[in-house]
Image (tube, rainbow, N blue to C red):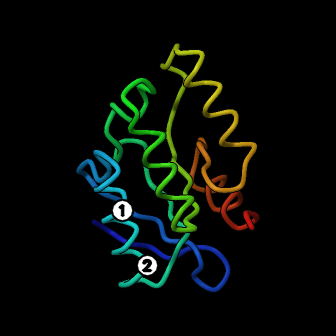
């Protein structure tokens, strides 16, 4: 994995990986604790390819579990990717609701990810 600090005062961590990092809620929790204790950061950016495709099938329950962990541990995340291939209305509604919230964002590019996380309180 490659870590790059972005944002004002290195407040946002962009994590790049060729492997899937988040498979389930436990792997998300492991990532959060590693980032918190090794990098002292709670705002992260991931590429969509770093997250299991099962996350994007809402009936699997993974998205809900991961999002709950993020919120419980006061993390903010932006996930960069193209979501146009998904046809599920519930998934589109989920993405819409997340993007109108303050903790989890699904964005098109790195600049938008940094902007959303910099403004999230």
Position above or below: 110 against 91: below
User: Disc 2 designates what residue?
Assistant: 36
User: Disc 1 designates what residue?
Assistant: 29
Local packing at callout 1 (Cα closer than 10 Å; few below 14, some 14-19, many 20+) is: some
Q: Quadrant of the C terminus?
A: bottom right
Side of 1 where 80 appears, left or right: right
> Are discs 1 and 2 less than 8 Å apart at CB?
no
Element on which disc 1 rests: helix
Task: Please name the residue shown 61% across and 31% down the image.
Answer: 94
Element on which disc 2 rests: helix
Mark 1, mark 2: which one is toward the viewer?
1
Task: Please name the residue shown 50% across and 39% down the image.
Answer: 81
Identify the mark nearer the N-term, 1 or 2: 1
Q: Nearer the viewer, residue 99 or 28?
A: 28
Side of 25 where 7 appears, left or right: right
C-alpha distance separating marks 1 and 2: 10 Å
Q: Position of residue 63 (x, y in %)?
A: 45, 39
């Amino acid at each position: 994995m490659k870590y790059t600090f972005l944002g004002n005062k290195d407040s946002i961590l962009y994590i790049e990986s060729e492997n899937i990092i988040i498979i389930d809620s436990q792997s998300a929790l492991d990532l959060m604790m590693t980032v918190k204790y090794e990098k002292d950061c709670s705002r992260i950016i991931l590429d969509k390819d770093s997250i299991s495709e099962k996350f994007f099938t809402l009936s699997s329950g993974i998205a809900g579990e991961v999002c709950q962990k993020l919120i419980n541990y006061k993390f903010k995340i932006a996930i960069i990717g193209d979501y146009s291939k998904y046809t599920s209305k519930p998934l589109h509604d989920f993405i819409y609701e997340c993007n109108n919230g303050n903790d989890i964002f699904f964005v098109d590019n790195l600049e938008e990810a940094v902007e959303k996380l910099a403004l999230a309180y």
